[in-house]
Structures are given as C-alpha cells and as structure tokens.
Amino acid sequence: MLRLPNNVLQKALIKLLKEKINPLIGVHDFVPANARIPYITIGNIVTHDTSTKTEDNTRLEIQINIWSTYKGKYEINRIAENIINLLTSEEGYLNVEDSGFKVYEQTINMYEAFPEENTGYNGVINLEVKVKNLQATAEDI
C-alpha cells in the first residue's frame, strides 16, 4: 500500500452525502456543539492492502453513523434507506480520480440500528470500497 486513500474517500463521501441527502440532516467529520439531530458522522475506517504484483489496491470498510433522538426506529431506518439507495446507485459512486485514485467497486455490506441509552437510536451502515492507486506503476510496487 503506497498511498492511503482514507482522507480522499472520506472527503468525497461527506461531500456526496451533504449534496444528495436531506439538507436538514447535517453530515460531520467532527460534530460541533450546536449540531442539530438527526445527523450523520463518518465512523471507523478499516483499510486493507489488496495490492497485486502490478497494482496498488486497497479495500476500505467505512462506517457511516446516523444519530437520532426519535424514540423509535422509523427515522433512523428512513435516513439509512436514503443513504443506502444513494450509495448503491450510479450517482452515488465515489469519484476520486482527480486525487489519483479510482473506485472500482462500492457496496453496502451491513446495516444495523440499535437504541442508545435514553437518547434515541444509532444506525451504522458499513460501506465497502475497493480503490486503485492510479499514480502507482508496476515498478513502484
């Protein structure tokens, strides 16, 4: 793994969610003190080196967290469904080629909603993204 695509993908994902999901739902890397609920955050990012002898490839598992104070699951599931529909559509494909990476596969492999202690629900979507480093050559690897 010659270059980490983590920051590039996180930036692209936040931008996409801000543009395409309900504008009343904030999307944050760092949650400000005055953030209105519901909102979305980017959680853990796990990076796996999947390089070959000739390509610098990475597989990332990106957690997307949804936070709600609604007492039931309806709001969290509705927001999650919108995010999942976006990220599995053509318009939701992360384009990071201007940063020297190319996403060649993007899937949702898990969604879970669970109650938070006395404060509503948290939803977790696990987005799996496979990325090629376009700037690497076979000689670099």
Image (tube, helix red, strand yellow):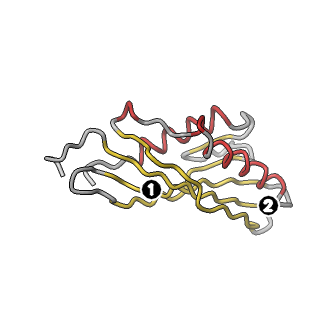
Residue placed at 75% from the left, 36% from the top? 24
Name the spot of residue 30 as percent of width and height, x first: 55, 47
- Which mark identifies residue 60? 1
Q: Is residue 41 left or right of residue 103?
A: right
Q: Give, as a three-letter code, the residue at label 2.
A: Gly
**Mark 2 or mark 1, which is nearer the start of the sequence?**
1
Q: Give, as a three-letter code, the residue at label 1.
A: Leu
Q: Looking at the image, is 77 positioned above or below residue 117?
A: above
Residue placed at 51% from the left, 39% from the top? 94
Q: Which image quadrant for residue 71?
A: bottom right
Q: Nearer the viewer, mark 1 or mark 2?
A: 1
User: What is the distance, in whole Å, between disc 1 and disc 2 at their CAs?
Assistant: 29 Å
Which quadrant is the N terminus positioned in? bottom left
Name the spot of residue 73 as percent of width and height, x first: 82, 60
Name the spot of residue 41 as percent of width and height, x first: 60, 50
Residue placed at 76% from the left, 61% from the top? 121
Q: Which image quadrant for residue 102?
A: top left
Name the spot of residue 34 as percent of width and height, x first: 69, 42
* Residue closer to the observer: 66 or 95: 95
Judged from the image, the secondary structure of the residue bearing numbered disc 1 is strand
Other residues around mark 1 within 10 Å, as few (<14) / some (14–19) / many (≥20)? many
Q: Which image quadrant for residue 32?
A: top right
Residue beneath label 2, please?
120
Judged from the image, the secondary structure of the residue bearing numbered disc 2 is strand
Other residues around mark 2 within 10 Å, as few (<14) / some (14–19) / many (≥20)? some
Residue placed at 72% from the left, 45% from the top? 82
